[in-house]
Amino acid sequence: MVSQLLRDGLHCPLHQAQIAMQTELRQAALAWLAEPDPSRKVAGVTDLYRAYQRGEVLLDGTVDLRTATPASGLSIPGRPQQPELVSPLAVKRRNMRTVEGRAALIHALAHIEFNAINLALDVIWRFPGMPDAFYADWLQVAQEEALHFSLLQQHLVTLGYCYGDFTAHNSLWEMATRTEHDILARIALVPRTMEARGLDASPPLRAKLAQAGDMAAAAILDIILRDEIGHVAIGNRWFGWLCEQGNLEPLATYAELAARYSAPTLRGPFNMEARRAAGFSDAELESLVGQAAE
């Protein structure tokens, strides 16, 4: 019932306040996670964030929705039929000298942001027993990722393309699947590893787009980098909190989790300024550089 209610009305301004008063945040996150239509997902997440900020959405972080909600009957994550998901090696190469090449790059970034919306929503519903601030943080992340996706999708349209017109890969969600029963691993290996790679990749990508004359795309990447520093910082903060609660040493714990879940080995160059701003310690950065050099 909640899922259908959310699908049919939460993004509609005429019904937003009335429905929000009947909504529990984590159930709503699950419903929008299962929504396959990108525009509906973006609108729903944006309205949910605003309603929560106004105090119109309840939060119950104690219920294990994996058993209390028929999540097995939902397609998680909800995604459109296109883009076709292929191996990372099969994703179309990006030639910045052509409009199509730039569009392929923007499409790849839009796909990352679409996945990032789903990742934030998944963390909210999947893991009970965390402080209220945890769920509020990841709802903010979901809303900002929705904005990023919208900006990239709108720019794609100006280039003559739409989300779904190119192939894409699923590496981000594959790591989410591997860590779906382990909150410590999820926080360690998705925001602090997979998504943190974007901090390193963003400056050279921005430079390529600017060199190709696409200053609108370069400006969007400036917004994304600014916000992603905050997202990775949220991951770092909650990883530290979880380690503290479990009396775990962060560096050794991260290394063990990375090995257990086959996290990718990160290669430089690293955006040290952005990583420091996101809360990585000097010891963590030294370890990162050392591993990349091996």
Image (spheres, rainbow, N blue to C red):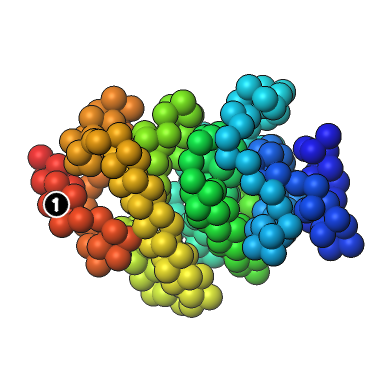
Residue 186 at x, y = what percent? 41, 36
Q: Which residue is drawn at 60% across and 58% down?
A: 143
Horizontal placement of 167 versus 34: left or right? left
| Quarter of the picture holding the N terminus | top right
Horizontal placement of 61 versus 38: left or right? left
Q: Quadrant of residue 103?
A: bottom right
Q: Which residue is drawn at 28% across and 42% down?
A: 244
Q: In which quarter of the image is residue 64?
A: top right
In the foreground, 3 or 273: 3
In the foreground, 122 or 197: 122
Judge whether 186 appears above or below 48 on screen: above
Q: In which quarter of the image is residue 115?
A: top right
Judge whether 269 appears above or below 72 on screen: below
Q: Name the residue under label 1.
A: 283
Horizontal placement of 107 versus 233: left or right? right
In the foreground, 178 or 87: 178
Residue 257 at x, y = what percent? 28, 31
Q: Which residue is drawn at 14% across and 46% down?
A: 287
Helix, strand or loop status at disc 1: helix
Neighbourhood count class around disc 1 (C-alpha, 10 Å): few under 14, some 14–19, many 20 upward = few
Residue 138 at x, y = what percent? 52, 51
Residue 103 seen anywhere in this rendered image of the structure: no
Residue 206 seen anywhere in this rendered image of the structure: yes
Q: Which amino acid does label 1 sit on?
A: Ala
Residue 7 at x, y = what percent? 80, 44
In the foreground, 144 or 262: 144
Residue extending furthest toward the right: 14
